[in-house]
Image (tube, helix red, strand yellow):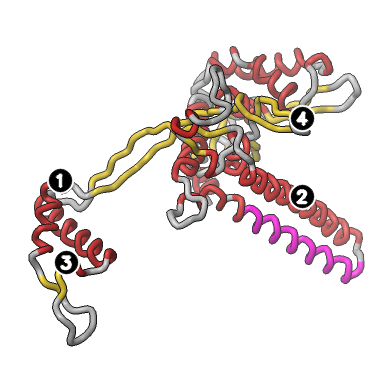
């Protein structure tokens, strides 16, 4: 619905685009990132690097020299694949990994130039009554002078100290709310502050391993879903038997249901730790995960605003409109004859994510040997949703 609304709005107006000059300067780094990091091959294996670079550079220079565009627009949905699970995996986020200086001080690995303490920011938001401490004491003193109904019919009146903790809290909240509404004309104040927490990179990764298994299993089910969808189309086009077509339909529903169930569970791994009653409650972990995801989307929006128009943002992606001359899909040729296809809009964003959000302190153990590495699993994928004529 959001894309359709944007389509109707912009289809009746001339759209102007501003270019982003930094893209030309970063073009080499972005393309090399695509080859060496995303495709995991060496640069000397590519035979048409200069041709692809020249084609993209020509399109970017055209937008730079003619910033006001009236050509056909492209509607893109740039989505981060499994953003929050991959954010937790990249940074080894888990509740028992959130430590403070006192824990690090007594750790056996606390030594100069240690790299196992990854320090990240998160945003704390608190709501409180505007009444001050002396006003709170005044209200509490007034409650101590009052009598309250008995716990059971026919029983003696109760004083405030005789009430249960839940009853005392409820009464204090009610009186403080009424007092604040009358005196301050509001019932709450809000405070937002940025805090820093330490993520231990050496902690036993039981939580991270669980997330990884669920994520990989979902990828497996999504692969089987694609296979059975192709089978269903093939069986239908070839006029196969009703039993074969019916089986393909059932398997499509089964694997679609399984991948959706795993998606819901994966997205609950960080939301669960926000609940105070959770066994592994960690507001710090939830806060860092949310802030990291929000920062990625905000940076993507800032970049898109300089070359196109953002249409709508959600928690893990962005709908945007790019000029028709903007570079889309390209293919690198390898010496072996194989082709490497990539989407330049995704590459420019993934390069940004790689530069800013790579965890260079990632610790992993293999065959009882520990090593430190760099890892980033957060990446965009793009879908061209349509074209708009000026």
Residue mark closest to the camera, 3 vs 4: 3
Residue 100 drawn above or below residue 140: above
Q: Position of residue 188 (x, y in %)?
A: 23, 50
Range of residues picked out in magenta: 241-264
Q: Residues within 10 Å of mark 4 (few under 14, many from 20)?
A: few
Q: CA distance from mark 4 to mark 1?
A: 62 Å
Q: Residues within 10 Å of mark 2 (few under 14, many from 20)?
A: few
In the drawing, does residue 200 fall left or right of residue 143?
Answer: right
Seen from the viewer's position, the closer of residues 13 and 311 is: 311
User: Badge 4 is on which residue?
Assistant: 341
User: Badge 3 is on which residue?
Assistant: 160
Q: Position of residue 248 (x, y in %)?
A: 83, 63
Does the CB distance between marks 3 and 2 fall below 8 Å? Answer: no
Q: Earlier in the sequence, mark 4 or mark 1?
A: 1
Q: Earlier in the sequence, mark 3 or mark 1?
A: 1
Dominant secondary structure, magenta? helix
Does the stretch in magenta take in 311? no
Q: CA distance from mark 3 to mark 4?
A: 72 Å
Label of residue 103 in the image: none
Residue mark closest to the camera, 4 vs 2: 2
Seen from the viewer's position, the closer of residues 256 and 21 is: 256
Q: Earlier in the sequence, mark 3 or mark 2?
A: 3
Q: CA distance from mark 4 to mark 2?
A: 22 Å
> Can the viewer see residue 264?
yes
User: Badge 1 is on which residue?
Assistant: 132
User: Badge 2 is on which residue?
Assistant: 220
Residue 304 drawn above or below residue 124: above
Secondary element at image label 4:
strand
- Identity of the residue drawn at 55% across and 33% down: 200
Secondary element at image label 3:
helix
- Occupied quadrant, residue 102: top left
Secondary element at image label 2:
helix
């Amino acid at each position: 619905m959001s894309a359709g609304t944007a389509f109707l709005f912009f289809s009746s107006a001339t759209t102007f685009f501003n270019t982003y000059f930094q893209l030309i300067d970063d073009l080499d780094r972005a393309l090399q990132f695509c080859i060496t990091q995303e495709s995991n091959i060496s640069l000397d294996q590519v035979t048409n690097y200069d041709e692809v670079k020249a084609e993209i550079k020509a399109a970017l220079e055209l937008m730079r020299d003619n910033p006001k565009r009236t050509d056909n627009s492209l509607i893109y949905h740039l989505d981060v694949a499994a953003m929050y699970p991959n954010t937790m995996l990249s940074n080894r986020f888990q509740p028992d990994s959130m430590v403070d200086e006192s824990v690090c001080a007594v750790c056996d690995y606390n030594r100069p130039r240690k790299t196992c303490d990854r320090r990240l920011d998160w945003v704390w938001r608190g709501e409180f009554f505007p009444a001050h401490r002396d006003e709170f004491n005044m209200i509490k003193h007034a409650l101590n002078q009052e009598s309250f109904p008995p716990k059971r019919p026919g029983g003696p009146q109760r004083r405030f100290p005789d009430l249960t903790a839940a009853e005392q809290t409820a009464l204090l909240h009610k009186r403080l709310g009424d007092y604040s509404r009358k005196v301050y004309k509001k019932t709450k104040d809000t405070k937002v502050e940025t805090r820093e927490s330490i993520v231990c990179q050496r902690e036993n990764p039981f939580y991270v391993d669980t997330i990884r298994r669920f994520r990989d299993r979902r990828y497996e089910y999504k692969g089987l879903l694609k296979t059975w969808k192709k089978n269903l189309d093939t069986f239908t086009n070839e006029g196969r038997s009703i039993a074969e077509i019916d089986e393909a339909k059932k398997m499509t529903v089964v694997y679609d249901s399984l991948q959706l169930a795993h998606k819901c569970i994966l997205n609950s791994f960080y939301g669960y730790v926000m609940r105070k009653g959770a066994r592994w409650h960690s507001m710090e972990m939830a806060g860092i995960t949310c802030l990291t995801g929000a920062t990625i989307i905000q940076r993507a929006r800032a970049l898109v605003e300089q070359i196109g128009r953002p249409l709508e943002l959600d928690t893990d992606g962005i709908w945007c409109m790019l000029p028709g001359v903007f570079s889309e899909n390209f293919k690198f040729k390898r010496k072996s004859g194989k082709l490497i296809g990539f989407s330049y809009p995704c590459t420019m964003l993934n390069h940004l994510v790689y530069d800013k959000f790579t965890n260079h302190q990632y610790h992993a153990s293999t065959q009882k040997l520990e090593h430190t590495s760099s890892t980033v699993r957060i990446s965009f994928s793009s879908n061209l949703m349509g074209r708009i004529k000026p």
